[in-house]
Amino acid sequence: PLGGTKPVKTNARILSATNRDLNKLVKDGKFRQDLYFRINVVKIHIPPLRERLEDLPLLVEHFIQRYNRLRGFSVSGISSEALDLLMGQEFPGNVRELENIIEYAFVLCRKGLLKPEHLPPDLRETAMIGKRQSASLQDVEADFLQETLRRHGFNRSAAARELNMHPVTLWRKMKKMGLFQND
């Protein structure tokens, strides 16, 4: 113990984690070899979240239950649109990044489903940029119209005003692009 004069026996196990190749660091002289051999007893390789996206829905559900319990909220789940946005992410921050995203969503949503608008803006923008890069001009226009309509509660007159177009023109575009399913 701190300040003690006699050693005290303990029985401890140390669990360590890294995203670096410790074997290579030992060879390069950047990590102590004796420490490496002490901690390298049982290796468990867990691939990053981006390589196991099938785990994402279960992790999201876990974090929703956890934050419901911690905060006393009644979020029932996540919408398919919001889950699709999450499935398209790289997750360089791994599971911690996902947890932070869900915690952010809980700031904006206390009950019902987590929706795309509850997710962090930078995540939504990144998803839209990626989607637009691989989309046709018509797809981009359809997404833009749908987002504008969603913002106005699918009120065509209000959306047409924002878009500075006649409501009949908007209606024709919606008909051509098949945007009536959310109406």
Image (spheres, helix red, strand yellow):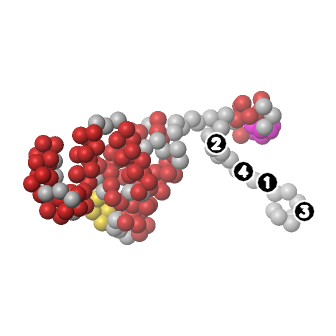
The stretch in magenta equals 31-38
Q: CA distance from mark 1 to mark 4?
A: 7 Å
Kind of residue at disc 4: Asn
* Residue corresponding to mark 2: 18
Q: Nearer the viewer, residue 118 or 78?
A: 118
Look at the numbered disc 3 and give the secondary structure of its residue.
loop
Look at mark 4 in the image and give the residue it sits on.
11
**SS of the residue under disc 4:** loop
Q: Earlier in the sequence, mark 1 or mark 2?
A: 1
State how far apart marks 3 and 1 are (Cα): 13 Å
Which residue shows up at 62% across the image and 40% down it? 19
Answer yes or no: is residue 36 visible: yes
Q: Which residue is mark 3?
A: 5
Which residue does the image show at 25% across and 45% down from the upper left?
A: 141
Q: Which residue is mark 1?
A: 9
Q: Residue 171 location, x and y as percent?
A: 11, 52
Expressed as whole percent of the image width and height from the top left, the position of residue 110 reads 34, 67
Which badge, 2 or 4, comes first in the chain's sequence?
A: 4
**Distance of label 3 from label 4 (alpha carbons):** 19 Å
Residue 169: % across, % down: 12, 52
- Whether 65 is among the magenta residues is no
Closer to the eye: label 2 or 3: 2
Q: Which amino acid type corresponds to the residue marked 3 in the rendered image?
A: Thr
Q: Where residue 9 sits in the image (x, y, percent)? A: 79, 54
